[in-house]
Image (cartoon, rainbow, N blue to C red):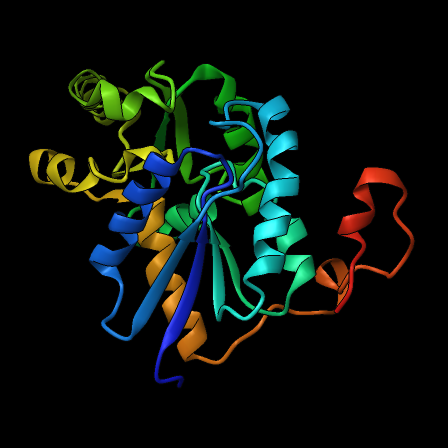
Amino acid sequence: MPDEINICLINPNTSASMTAAIEAGAKTVASSNTRIIAVNPDSGPISIEGYYDEVFSLPGLITKVKEHKDADAFIIACFDDTGLDAARAMTNKPVLGIGQSACYIASMLSETFGIITTLDISVPILKNNIYKMGFGKRCTSVTSVEVPVLELEKQSKLAIGKIREEIGRLISDKKVESIVLGCAGMVEFANSLEKEFSIPIIEGVSAATVLSEGIVKMNKSTSKIGGYAFPRQKEYIGEMKKFEFEK
């Protein structure tokens, strides 16, 4: 087991204030020998809300993985798990998405769970991810509170009020046994909501941090057979040339 664990936490959007909040959330659960390296791209969308934003966040995300290749593990801090498969193909280090991590934790703490995210535009993405992960029967609801990602900080009282209302509805109507907060920007809300509702309230930043530490301590790496094999070396043309893969 390494003396120090270096986890590169990548916020795929360009909001430095959100990156700082995510970093703080990760540090609340990280072990004393874990170093959190929180970064975000220099260019790209300031928030990721839907399929279009996701595509244009990928070059910045891939660049940050390349820049921090010596990290022991990577966390992609967007609940959509933006670029997760591509990042895993780039490295044999563990790469965790906060969406996948939160859902795995929820499935170990409850029979059923619901996801509450920011905007309706993200709901289809999250539903597709749920079925891809095999949680279609466990996740009984994916809903939104219609608060834009960057408004979570500015309108925290409004946001937490809407989330609180939606949690109550999901417990009553959908009989969920735990809640997953479906945005990295909700990292600060989980503890107070869990105390209020007395059910597990899981946010992905903490989930991914503790799971990353565990995988590193187990000395496990990403399989390089099959889908996550290193990309074949080939020529990239034009402005994409800088993304040619080199081991």
Q: Position of residue 155 (x, y in %)?
A: 22, 18
- Whether residue 244 sits left or right of residue 62 in the image: it is right
Q: Residue at x 24, y 20 (%)?
A: 154
- Whether residue 54 sits left or right of residue 46 in the image: it is right
Against 34, residue 231 (above or below) is above
Q: Is residue 111 visible?
A: no
- Whether residue 180 sits left or right of residue 198 in the image: it is right
- Whether residue 118 sits left or right of residue 241 in the image: it is left
Quarter of the figure with residue 11: top left
Which quadrant: the C terminus? bottom right
Quarter of the figure with residue 188: top left
Q: Residue at x 32, y 17 (%)?
A: 145
Q: Residue at x 31, y 19 (%)?
A: 151
How many numbered marks appear?
A: 0
Q: Position of residue 133 (x, y in %)?
A: 55, 46
Q: Residue at x 36, y 23 (%)?
A: 150
Q: Position of residue 72 (x, y in %)?
A: 48, 71
Front-lying residue, 59 or 213? 59
Q: Is residue 82 visible?
A: yes
Which quadrant: the N terminus? bottom left
